[in-house]
Image: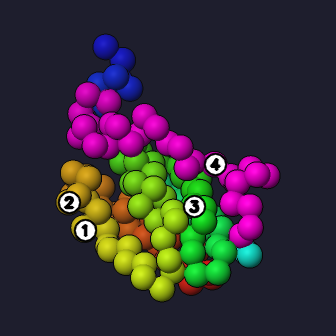
């Protein structure tokens, strides 16, 4: 069995499902988020340290009409970014409650050893939201 298959077998079902469908990964394409008044970006982490995350938000009025991310990291990192993007897209900025990495870890069954990676995700997302 390959090492990648070994790792996939160790992932919680929710992480595995999210990791297999990273629909919000990458950049916005031309037709996405049409009507967005502006975009906000935030990033955190360093690839040399194992985790780097960038969030891009498309905002129209007080609504997040699009959320995209680019991430370098483990499956837990990418799956958490995807879960956040799905959770936030379409929501109003004035009623946004993103929670915190400990809550995310509990909801997604992310091991405690990965909490540092979730802190990088939080830093990147908060940086983008601050610029919104």
Q: Dot 4, crowdedness within 10 Å: few (<14), some or many (≥20)?
A: some
User: Total marks drawn?
Assistant: 4
126 relative to 50, above or below = below
Q: Nearer the viewer, residue 117 or 59?
A: 59
Q: Who is closer to the viewer here, 115 or 18?
A: 18
Q: Residue at x 29, y 62 (%)?
A: 104
| Residue at the disc numbered 2 | 106
Residue on which the image places disc 3: 67
Q: Which residues are magenta?
A: 8-36
Q: Main secondary structure of the magenta part?
A: loop
- What residue is disc 4 on? 26
Identify the secondary structure beneath mark 1: helix
Dot placed on the residue nearer the N-terminal end, 3 or 4: 4
**Do the residues under discs 2 and 1 have CB atoms within 8 angstroms?**
yes
Where is mark 1, residue-wise?
102
- Numbered disc 3: secondary structure: strand
Whole-angstrom CA distance, mark 3 to mark 4, is: 10 Å
User: Of callouts 4 and 2, which one flags the residue occurring earlier in the amino acid sequence?
Assistant: 4
Packing grade of label 1 (10 A; few <14, some 14-19, many >=20) is few
Q: Quadrant of the N terminus?
A: top left
């Amino acid at each position: 069995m390959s090492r990648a298959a070994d790792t996939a077998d160790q992932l919680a079902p929710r992480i595995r499902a999210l990791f297999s469908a990273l629909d919000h990964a990458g950049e916005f394409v031309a037709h996405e988020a049409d009507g967005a008044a502006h975009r906000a970006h935030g990033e955190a982490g360093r690839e040399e340290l194992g985790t780097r995350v960038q969030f891009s938000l498309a905002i129209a009025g007080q609504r997040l009409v699009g959320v995209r991310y680019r991430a370098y990291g483990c499956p837990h990192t990418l799956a958490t970014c995807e879960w956040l993007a799905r959770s936030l897209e379409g929501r109003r900025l004035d009623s946004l409650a993103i929670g915190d990495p400990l809550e995310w870890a509990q909801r997604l069954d992310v091991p405690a050893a990965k909490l540092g990676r979730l802190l990088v995700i939080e830093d990147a997302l908060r940086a983008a939201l601050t610029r919104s």
